[in-house]
């Protein structure tokens, strides 16, 4: 079962079955301690707002490099979706998917943080798009 872990040196948060042996942020060895999801939520809230829309857009463009999908070239649609994602961050704490409802169950809702694992969804397999159309299969274009 996956749990939350916090590096006691730099507060890096890891979500997984086991913590990394070496913290990827500060390189401390054996530095992770298990924490509650509430604590992880609070700590992740500390960085809320660090990522503006432009930076997030650049990050998802980079994320698609060398992948079979890309950010939708429909700029108007992307702007609308990014607005929804950032409104969710403002109102609910994290960059949740703009077209799905959060359940108020932190661990479950983590599956709805954008980008989600849309490659496994039927919508992507059938239509070549994530649920909201933020990402589209390259061959579709
Ligand atoms: S469906 Fe698309 S927009 Fe929604 S979280 Fe997944 S990747 Fe982001």
Image (cartoon, helix red, strand yellow):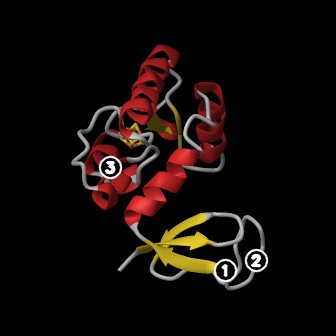
Locate residue 76, reporting x and y percent: 47, 14
Q: In which quarter of the image is residue 17?
A: bottom left
- Label 1 crowd (10 A; few <14 / some 14-19 / many >=20): many
Callout in the foreground (3, 2): 2
The residue located at (52%, 38%) in the rendering is: 138
Residue on which the image places disc 1: 31
Residue on which the image places disc 2: 28
Residue on which the image places disc 3: 125
Residue at disc 3, secondary structure = helix
Question: Splitting the image into four quadrants, where does ligand 1 fall?
Answer: top left
Whole-number angstrom distance, CA of label 3 to CA of label 2: 40 Å
Please give left or right for residue 26 compared with residue 47 in the image.
right
Locate residue 135, reporting x and y percent: 46, 37
Residue at disc 2, secondary structure = loop
Label 2 C-beta lies within 8 Å of the nearest ligand 1 atom: no
Which numbered disc flags the more N-terminal residue, 3 or 1? Answer: 1
Callout in the foreground (3, 1): 1
Q: Nearer the viewer, residue 40 or 54?
A: 40
Residue at disc 1, secondary structure = loop
Tell me the quarter of the image containing the N terminus: bottom left
Locate residue 4, reporting x and y percent: 46, 70
Against 40, is 74 above or below? above
Please give left or right for residue 14 compared with residue 115 in the image.
right
The residue located at (39%, 75%) in the rendering is: 2
Q: Quadrant of residue 61?
A: top right
């Amino acid at each position: 079962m996956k749990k939350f872990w916090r590096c006691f040196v730099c507060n890096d948060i890891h979500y997984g079955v086991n913590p990394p042996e070496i913290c990827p942020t500060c390189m401390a060895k054996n530095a992770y301690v298990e924490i509650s999801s509430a604590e992880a939520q609070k700590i992740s809230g500390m960085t809320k707002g660090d990522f503006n829309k432009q930076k997030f857009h650049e990050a998802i463009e980079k994320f698609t490099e060398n992948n079979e999908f890309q950010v939708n070239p429909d700029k108007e649609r992307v702007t609308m979706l990014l607005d929804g994602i950032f409104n969710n961050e403002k109102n609910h704490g994290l960059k949740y998917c703009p077209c799905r409802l959060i359940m108020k169950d932190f661990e479950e809702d983590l599956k709805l943080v954008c980008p989600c694992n849309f490659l496994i969804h039927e919508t992507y397999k059938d239509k070549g798009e994530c649920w909201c159309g933020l990402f589209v299969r390259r061959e579709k274009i």
